[in-house]
Image (cartoon, rainbow, N blue to C red):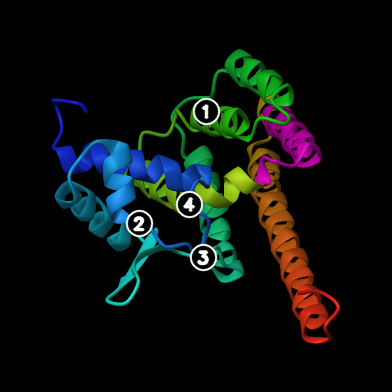
Amino acid sequence: MSPKRPLRDDVRQQVLERLLRGEFPPGSRINETTLATDLGVSRTPLREALLDLRREGFVRSDAARGFTVRALTAGEIREIYPMVWTLEGLALRTADRSPDDNELEVINGELAGAKGNPGRALELDSRWHAVLLAGCENRRLRAMISDLKLAIRRYEYAFMWNAGLIGRSVEQHREVSEALANGDLHAAVQSLENNWRTGMESLLEQMAGAMVGQRRIHHRSEDGEMR
């Protein structure tokens, strides 16, 4: 644990990282005793951390089940993704300086080679967007973008499992860079929006497919074909 921060903050960060990696499936109950032992802390700082994560929308709590991981929902995707691409577009349009083309290219090349490693791919994708918007000096705007991205990080992790989608994202990143190199800020903002829109639509398709699969299993179970 870091001596520079309150224990609850370190515990919150560790639990959050596990949530974002999907170690606790959506809808699952968090066993506080087991998790506290695993983290090497008492239940008091863990409970404080979980209460913070509840306020941030990552977990729920009730008297009967304790803390549970919030489910991934199509509604949340539809709410947050347009906000992200709108605010990132604003940050890019109002940036005081252009991003480092070489750094964007290097990161994007590494992203292309990160297929099959969603954690690494997500790290690289996040870094690419950070470099793209580094010239925006509006700290409040950047903080808003950061908070929204934290809320969808679990969704982005799921997106990065699909190697084909990573390839599409890499190509869209190139389109943003090429538009900026040509001095076409409008096209760059549009390509950036397309990048986020692709993620949103792909995730919605994945969720719709999963729901159809669950319904089929349920119907088969009711018919006695699958128990």
Based on the displayed image, in which of its 4 quarters is residue 188 positioned? top right
Nearer the observer: mark 3 or 4; the answer is 4
Question: Which badge, 3 or 2, comes first in the chain's sequence?
Answer: 2
Residue at 47 percent of width and 25 percent of height: 97
Question: Which badge, 1 or 2, comes first in the chain's sequence?
Answer: 2
State the separation of the CA atoms marked 4 and 2.
Answer: 10 Å
Q: Which span of residues is magenta-colored?
A: 159-179
**Left or right of 8 in this view: 50:** right
Residue at 66 percent of width and 56 percent of height: 200
Which amino acid, by three-letter code, is at mark 3?
Ala
Q: Please name the residue that numbered disc 4 is placed on.
A: 24
Point out residue 60 in the picture as x, y percentages from the top left corner: 36, 67
Q: Is residue 137 magenta?
A: no
Residue at 69 percent of width and 63 percent of height: 207
Q: Which mark is residue 71?
A: 3
Q: Residues within 10 Å of mark 1 (few under 14, many from 20)?
A: some
State the separation of the CA atoms marked 3 and 4.
Answer: 11 Å
The reply to whether the C-beta atoms of the residues labelled 1 and 4 are less than 8 Å apart is no
Question: Which badge, 3 or 4, comes first in the chain's sequence?
Answer: 4
Residue extending furthest bottom? 223
Q: Please name the residue that numbered disc 2 is placed on.
A: 31
State the separation of the CA atoms marked 1 and 2.
Answer: 33 Å
Nearer the observer: mark 4 or 2; the answer is 2
